[in-house]
Image: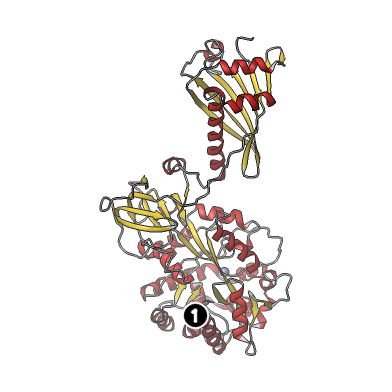
Amino acid sequence: MKQYLSVLCLSVILIFPTRAQQVDAPTIAITNITVIDGTGSAQQPNMTLVIKNEIISDLFPTGQKTLPGESKILDMSGHFVLPGLIDAHVHLTKNPDPEKRLKALLASGTTTVRDMGGDARTLSVLARDAKLGTIQTPNIYYSAVLFGASFLQDPRTRFAARGLKPGEAPWMRVVTGHTDLPQIIAEAKGTGATGIKLYSAIEPGLLKQITNEAHRQGLKVWSHATIFPSKPSDAVSAGADVLSHSGGLYPEAFSGLPSGFNEAITEWMPKQDFSTDPGDAPYDSLYHLMANNGTILEPTFSAGESPRVDTGQAGQSQHLAEAARNIDMSARRAWTIGATREAYEAGVTIAAGTDSDGSVPVQSEIETLVEHGVSPLDAIKAATLNNARAIGIEETHGSLEVGKRADFVLLSGDPLQDINFLRNIILVAKDGVLYPQNASVSNEVGQDSGNEREVDKKELLRLNEELARSQIVDRDSAFIEQVALDDFRVLAPGGLIENKSQVIAGLSAWDATDVQLTGTEVLFYGDIALVMGRMDIDGIMKPVGRWGPLKYMSTWVREGEEWRLLLRSLTPCKEILLKMGRC
Ligand SMILES: [Zn+2]
């Protein structure tokens, strides 16, 4: 028999489960962290946050209580924890690949979104998958949009209802004085929507009736700040829960408003110079009315900032882009900022939403709030507890309190000192599932990172180690007798060794007790992965007889959720190769 086997090529089928199922999740305690709880209260240093079965089961100063014996403890001293961020205004179905976008959004720290208008058929599927945890995504809540007949000229109403008669989809519907409100609101609720969005061409009287009926059926009412021809104060008086777009408060000071949104943006708005003072009388009374009624204001500073994506729905928002060219957008933005600050100072609850397709992080809204005089604690509250209130989930989400869902983010620095730390997210948790966002936290957590490549890499390293042990150390009998007999192909200098029994005898004679893997590299080519490195047997660095370092390369192919080994080759590291640094 040869002194050593030059190259072993094994073709082995090994199937291991890749994604552990969480059956009864272990208790996780994150210790020594500074808590910013989302309620606007001062930060609390040196706290311990305990998670059990998707819920925050305890929160207390570190050391004050003993942790359950089986707890997994993650010491995260120096880090800051706050509730998972909520984006109160997205349009997910605008994006051609919402799943990919949602995954990135979760990784950026957003654990919940409110969709403010889109195809409810798509949204309901995404929301279901979010609940089941079959895709990595924030929780999804969405709206059903109601508008007067003239708004049907807006192409968005047709795109979101394709396949149905425009204006008759339960989530994108025309409403008039003759509409059977209890019926259409029940149908809107049947789409799985959490709220009714009011958009355009609804008179104040009808506004009130819709709001009453929606509330009676347990739905929220989310309104454009101005539903032309109604004024913002009409929506507030009618009982709307949230008004979107601070810039849309501007018409409050005017009478004889256009009859609908499209007339407003094409004819009325271009004539406006936004020179009214957002602190003047009509606005001031509006803010006080909102504060007294508990109406939430969602400014949407980032509106219009989503990059243009090809949705295959050309022209869907073309009219908005054209209208924007005729409106003084920088004056409007300045007015938006001024009105938001005035409203905040008058005690109005501020929410935070980007009005994007999910590509603008809600951090951008928080940063703008801070830049314009909102305290960092209040700006964080806007994107957490206030947004949870806007959606109606404040009993279970939006703050770090015992009994609430374990949705939170861990930051590497203090966002109250520098709000930009909100973008430095090292861990996201949603429903108690941890998604580490960098390698060191991934190690600490001992769990897959949210990054799929990281997940694959960890899994391949584990399989690779298992394979090395079963070959070299355990000399697993199943491996040698069955797999080797069936699947060994042995190459030696000069060609193929046909005599398998020789090889098997050689393998059986090995009496290694330890194998260490070093210099492991994983390369991906689509669904094929190459794993390479060196095996040091029994710590002997020099090749002695058959023993010593071996170079290996294994080829794996992904089949569904599993990685299957295609081929493994071993090459002894000869002294000359070691000297040359090639092993
Ligand atoms: Zn919007």
Q: Is residue 59 above or below residue 547?
A: below
Quadrant in which the C terminus is drawn: top right
Query: Can residue 557 be seen from the camera position used here?
Result: yes
Residue drawn at the location 53% of the way across and 27% of the way down: 469
Please tell me how crowded label 1 is: few (under 14), some (14-19), or many (20+) other residues with Cα within 10 Å. Answer: many
Residue 226 as seen in the image, left or right of residue 287: right
Quadrant in which the N terminus is drawn: top right
> Would the CB of label 1 be found within 8 Å of ligand 1?
no
- Considering every residue shown, the one lying at the far left of the view is 64
Q: Is residue 61 above or below residue 20?
A: below
- Residue 487, image x and y in percent? 68, 26
- Who is closer to the viewer here, 33 or 135? 135
- Residue 172, image x and y in percent? 64, 75
Number of numbered tags placed on the structure image: 1
Query: Can residue 418 be seen from the camera position used here?
Result: no
Residue drawn at the location 53% of the way across and 30% of the way down: 465
| Quadrant hosting residue 525 | top right
Query: Please, what is the three-letter code of the amino acid marked with disc 1?
Result: Ala
Q: How are the colours assigned in the image?
A: secondary structure
Residue drawn at the location 43% of the way across and 54% of the way down: 409
Q: Which residue is mark 1?
A: 240
- Residue 352, image x and y in percent? 46, 66
* Ligand 1: image quarter: bottom right
Q: Secondary structure at mark 1?
A: loop
- Who is closer to the viewer here, 510 or 405? 510
| Quadrant hosting residue 558 | top right
